[in-house]
Amino acid sequence: MTKIYVMGFAENVKFEMDFQDIQMKELSIKTGISKNTLDKYLFGKKVQPGVENAVKIATALGVSVEYLVFGDFKSDEKSTFVNSDYSVYIDKYKRLNKFNRKTIDDLIESLLTRQ
């Protein structure tokens, strides 16, 4: 089984912002964190927020801090790797626009209810 690295905090925040169609300015307003500081977290060189700011960001995005840090993994899981078979679908999903992601989500839910 080939393993690949799953996104980290900055990548997960950027993914969630893109998914929710939230701009940096809006996130700054929702969190009370300056745009410059958010830029450092998301585009700086390995700058990580403290717990307080991580909680503010997660709350503003409606997700858990664990999700932002670990992606889809639970916080008690030690592995931050995903099977490469699934990573192909994750990469494709990330490239879809908001409408098409919603369509895929609805399709998956429909298929799951049929099982």
Image: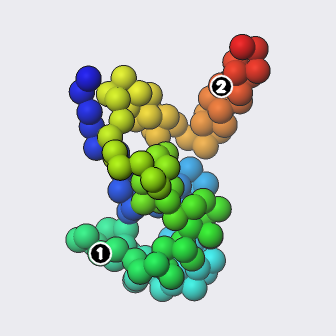
* Up/down of 74 relative to 61, above or below: above
Residue drawn at x 61%, y 54% is: 20
Residue 59 rendering spot, x and y as whole percentages = 62, 70
* Up/down of 5 relative to 112, above or below: below
Could you tell me if residue 97 is visible in this image? yes
Could you tell me if residue 71 is visible in this image? no
Q: Amino acid at mark 1?
A: Val
Which image quarter: residue 107?
top right
Question: Quadrant where the C terminus lies?
Answer: top right
Look at mark 2 in the image and give the residue it sits on.
108
Residue drawn at x 36%, y 23% is: 85
Q: Is residue 24 left or right of residue 20?
A: left
Q: Amino acid at mark 2?
A: Ile
- Dot 2 alpha-carbon crowd within 10 angstroms: few under 14, some 14 to 19, many 20 or more: few
Q: Nearer the viewer, residue 11 or 55?
A: 55
Residue 112 rendering spot, x and y as whole percentages = 70, 21
Residue 35 rendering spot, x and y as whole percentages = 46, 81
Q: Gap in Å between the C-alphas at discs 1 and 2?
A: 36 Å
Residue drawn at x 56%, y 41% is: 97
Which image quarter: residue 60?
bottom right
Look at mark 1 in the image and give the residue it sits on.
47
